[in-house]
Image (spheres, rainbow, N blue to C red):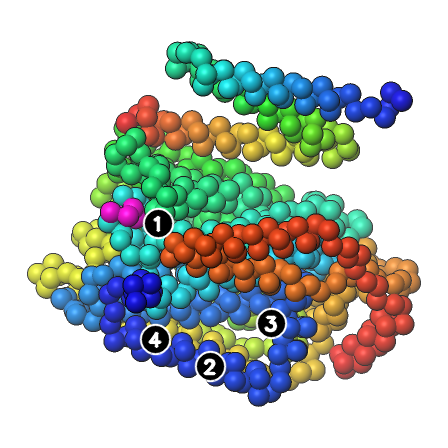
């Protein structure tokens, strides 16, 4: 019975709902810009990680290595793009 | 009448009306011709519904050649307009439309399908596979690309062409300054084609990672396959940016959002920024497969193993990563400070290093080689010096302080044509000549081929070197005319003559195809160039299953080893082969996409909603469809094999 019940997925689902609620709080309560952004950024990244690991089964096959390599590469490029853009359009304007 | 008014061309001229008639008549002739020769069934069964990578490849090739013609006509018109001061052949609006169309067509609808033709045709053969990983998706990629291309190309006769440059910078591209539907065409046609390209990227990464012949480790892949792999990785990481960018641009133009507007919190420079986040990797998507083709050709005709295999691969990996770090070099003059500019200057110059490594590897491959000057090799030998010149001027442009002088002048135009023509276009033509016998079973005429290569190069030098000079003297790009007193006239006349010579070279290429179809001998066997990698190990014409027996690989040039060193390529017996079924769904779905795109461009909402539902319906249908493919029996394979073996003699 234990193997049949997808406990990991159910927990994951609950957790992702909680993350969504926390993110929504930014909209419904009166936080400062910095606090709001921090909350959003953290919940967004945790949420994305959760989806990839729990629901898209990133770590469950023997391709694990290449899947994570791919994700880290994407992350690197995304971060470079974001920080480069900030540098060009905001910080060094 | 109001409804139909919007389809009228806002700024017509005799040429546009003449093209309308011309296009109408051509369409009619095609339909009548196909009906008369009763070819509809053949077309549908063998081409439109095909999922065979080779046939899809050939359709990409035809599209690319067609677009080379279209873009080429645009180019000659521009050069003619500029050949004399105060020329009135094109007015400013038409000139804007022509250069915008030329850029988009050449990059997205000529160069891209040309390299994707090579991906499709060569990659499965080079790795010893039967098809790509997702054949049906591949057909969808092609048809989406094709419909995007079609949509973009009708713009100048229905509603008006885009006129804000191939970069389509905001605020110029916003509703306020670009009032016609032209820029809607830009946003939506490229979007549809881009989705196709993104799927191509996913498809080929999977194919290369999962479907290599036994023994072909990553470091034993042919160099073209490596370059295709890296280019597809760049596609998968860069094209989503374009998708999002175009979606944002579409929303600004159609739904009144304010991403790129100058007020209401919009930021017009964000467009330029994100455009080049995609745009710079895009130029490497084009050049890396070109490098791959040169590597194959140079090692074949220097009769030597490619020098520095590992450093070739490493340099491509480094280029692919660095290509994402340099985009701001396209707008050094946009107003950011010296810190940002210096960082992007340095990363840009860094790319020249791995590129240089590749140049030296080719030179070392030639060193002590027994060089044979065939047409593909001639293109490669012309490529090395001409491309190096373009690379050097690239490094000049990369110095941000100096770029204030070069930016938006003809110098920049000369630079990128200098890398794209000898880099990408020569590679395409060299590759086409090289692989033509594999694809069609006869060679292109060598003499005509060499004439084409030389004419193209003479034309290229005459057309573009003068631009470096006038550019430094201050001739701005995208200006439809200039006055006598600037002193630019002589150089621009030379440019026009060069462009005309290049046009003659294109005619010669077409004539060569015609001539070779008629007169070229057909008994050339399956390995006319004495080549090295797996694609030459199967029959010509290539049977639909590519290899009757999956080849065994032990080195980077298994076919050469099988010819010279007694390596046994095909071990074991023929077994039945599993192949995918044809399907009309990709074509139908893409047609619906076409109508959807058209409805979006002209804001015909009911039609847009209906077609959107149609697209989703196609997706749903596919999800529930059961299609397990089919088997080719052993007898059938044996029969084909004997027939093809006979054909060789
Ligand atoms: C050594 C390598 C290269 C360097 C250092 C380099 C550098 C640059 C720089 C700095 C610019 C912007 C200049 C300006 O706007 O003022 C530029 C523009 C451009 N480059 Fe390169 N480049 C290199 C190779 C290539 C290659 C291989 C291609 C294409 C296959 C290419 C295609 C282009 C295009 C299409 C543009 C400008 C397009 C436009 O503004 O419309 N470049 N390059
Ligand atoms: Cu660039």
Picture quadrant of residue B142: bottom right
Is there one chain holding both mark 1 and mark 3?
yes
The answer to whether marks 2 and 4 mark residues whose Cβ atoms lie closer than 8 Å is no
Chain letter for mark 4: B
- Which residues are drawn in magenta? B172-176
Q: What residue is shown at x 19% (from left), y 54% (from top)?
A: B475
**Mark 1 highlights which residue?**
B167
Is there one chain holding both mark 4 and mark 1?
yes
First-in-chain label (2 vs 4) = 4
Estimate the spatial distance between the alpha carbons at disc 2 and disc 4, rounded to whole Å: 14 Å
Secondary element type, mark 4 = helix
The answer to whether marks 2 and 3 mark residues whose Cβ atoms lie closer than 8 Å is no
Q: Is residue A39 left or right of residue B264?
A: right
* Residue B19 visible in the snapshot: yes
Estimate the spatial distance between the alpha carbons at disc 2 and disc 3, rounded to whole Å: 30 Å
> Ligand 1 within 8 A of label 1's CB?
yes
**Mark 4 highlights which residue?**
B19
Estimate the spatial distance between the alpha carbons at disc 3 and disc 4, rounded to whole Å: 32 Å
Is there one chain holding both mark 1 and mark 2?
yes
Chain letter for mark 2: B
The nearer-to-camera label among 1 and 3 is 1
The C terminus of chain A lies in which quarter of the figure?
top left
First-in-chain label (1 vs 3) = 1
> Ligand 1 within 8 A of label 4's CB?
no
């Amino acid at each position: 019975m234990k193997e049949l019940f997808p406990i990991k997925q159910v927990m994951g689902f609950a957790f992702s709902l909680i993350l969504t609620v926390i993110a929504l709080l930014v909209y419904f309560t009166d936080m400062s810009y910095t606090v709001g952004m921090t909350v959003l950024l953290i919940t967004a990244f945790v949420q994305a990680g959760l989806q990839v690991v729990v629901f898209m089964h990133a770590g469950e096959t023997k391709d694990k290595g290449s899947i994570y390599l791919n994700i880290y590469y994407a992350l690197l490029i995304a971060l470079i793009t974001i920080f480069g853009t900030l540098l060009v359009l905001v910080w060094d304007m | 009448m109001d409804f139909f008014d919007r389809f009228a061309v806002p700024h017509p001229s005799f040429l546009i009306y003449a093209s309308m008639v011309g296009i109408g008549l051509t369409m009619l002739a095609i339909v009548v011709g196909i009906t008369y020769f009763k070819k509809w069934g053949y077309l549908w069964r063998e081409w439109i519904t095909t999922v065979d990578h080779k046939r899809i490849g050939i359709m990409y090739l035809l599209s690319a050649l067609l677009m080379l013609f279209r873009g080429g006509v645009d180019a000659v018109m521009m050069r003619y307009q500029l050949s004399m001061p105060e020329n009135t052949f094109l007015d400013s609006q038409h000139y804007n439309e022509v250069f915008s169309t030329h850029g988009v067509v050449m990059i997205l609808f000529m160069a891209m399908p040309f390299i994707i033709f090579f991906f499709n045709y060569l990659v499965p053969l080079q790795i010893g596979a039967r098809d790509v990983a997702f054949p049906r998706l591949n057909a969808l990629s092609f048809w989406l690309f094709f419909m995007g291309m079609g949509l973009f190309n009708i713009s100048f006769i229905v509603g008006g062409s885009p006129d804000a440059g191939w970069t389509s910078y905001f605020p110029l591209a916003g509703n306020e300054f670009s009032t016609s539907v032209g820029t809607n065409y830009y946003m939506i046609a490229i979007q549809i084609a881009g989705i196709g390209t993104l799927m191509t990227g996913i498809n080929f990464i999977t194919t290369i990672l999962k479907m290599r012949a036994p023994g072909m480790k990553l470091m034993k892949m042919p160099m073209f396959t490596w370059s295709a792999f890296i280019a597809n990785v760049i596609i998968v990481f860069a094209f989503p940016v374009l998708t999002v960018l175009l979606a944002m641009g579409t929303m600004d133009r159609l739904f009144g959002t304010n991403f790129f507007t100058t007020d209401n919190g919009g930021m017009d420079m964000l467009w330029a920024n994100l455009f080049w986040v995609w745009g710079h990797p895009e130029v490497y998507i084009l050049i890396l497969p070109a490098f791959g083709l040169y590597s194959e050709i140079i090692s074949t005709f220097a009769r030597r193993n490619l020098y520095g295999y590992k450093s070739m691969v490493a340099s491509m990996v480094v280029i692919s990563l660095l290509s994402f770090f340099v985009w701001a070099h396209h707008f050094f003059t946009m107003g950011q400070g010296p810190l940002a500019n210096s960082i992007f200057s340095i990363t840009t110059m860094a790319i020249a290093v791995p590129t240089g490594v590749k140049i030296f590897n080719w030179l070392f491959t030639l060193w002590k080689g027994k060089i044979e000057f065939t047409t593909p090799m001639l293109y490669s030998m012309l490529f090395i010096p001409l491309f190096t010149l373009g690379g050097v001027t690239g490094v000049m442009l990369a110095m941000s302080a100096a770029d204030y002088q070069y930016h938006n002048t003809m110098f920049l135009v000369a630079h990128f044509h200098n890398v794209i023509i000898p880099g990408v276009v020569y590679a395409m033509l060299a590759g086409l000549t090289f692989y033509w016998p594999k694809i069609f079973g006869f060679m292109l005429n060598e003499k005509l081929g060499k004439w084409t290569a030389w004419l193209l190069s003479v034309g290229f030098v005459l057309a573009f070197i003068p631009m470096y000079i006038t550019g430094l003297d201050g001739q701005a790009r995208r200006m439809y005319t200039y006055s006598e007193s600037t002193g630019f006239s002589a150089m621009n006349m030379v440019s026009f003559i060069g462009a005309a010579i290049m046009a003659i070279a294109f005619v010669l290429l077409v004539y060569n195809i015609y001539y070779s179809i008629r007169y070229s001998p057909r008994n050339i066997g399956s390995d006319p160039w004495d080549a090295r990698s797996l694609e030459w190990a199967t029959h010509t014409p290539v049977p639909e299953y590519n290899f009757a027996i999956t080849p065994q690989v032990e080195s980077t040039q298994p076919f050469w080893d099988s010819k010279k060193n007694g390596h046994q390529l095909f071990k074991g017996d023929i077994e039945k082969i599993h192949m995918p079924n044809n399907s009309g769904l990709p074509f139908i779905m893409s047609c619906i996409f076409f109508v959807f795109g058209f409805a979006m461009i002209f804001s015909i909402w009911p039609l847009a909603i209906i077609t959107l539902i149609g697209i989703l319906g196609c997706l749903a249908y596919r999800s529930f469809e059961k299609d397990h493919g089919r088997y080719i029996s052993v007898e059938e394979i044996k029969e084909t094999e004997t027939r093809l073996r006979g054909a060789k003699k």
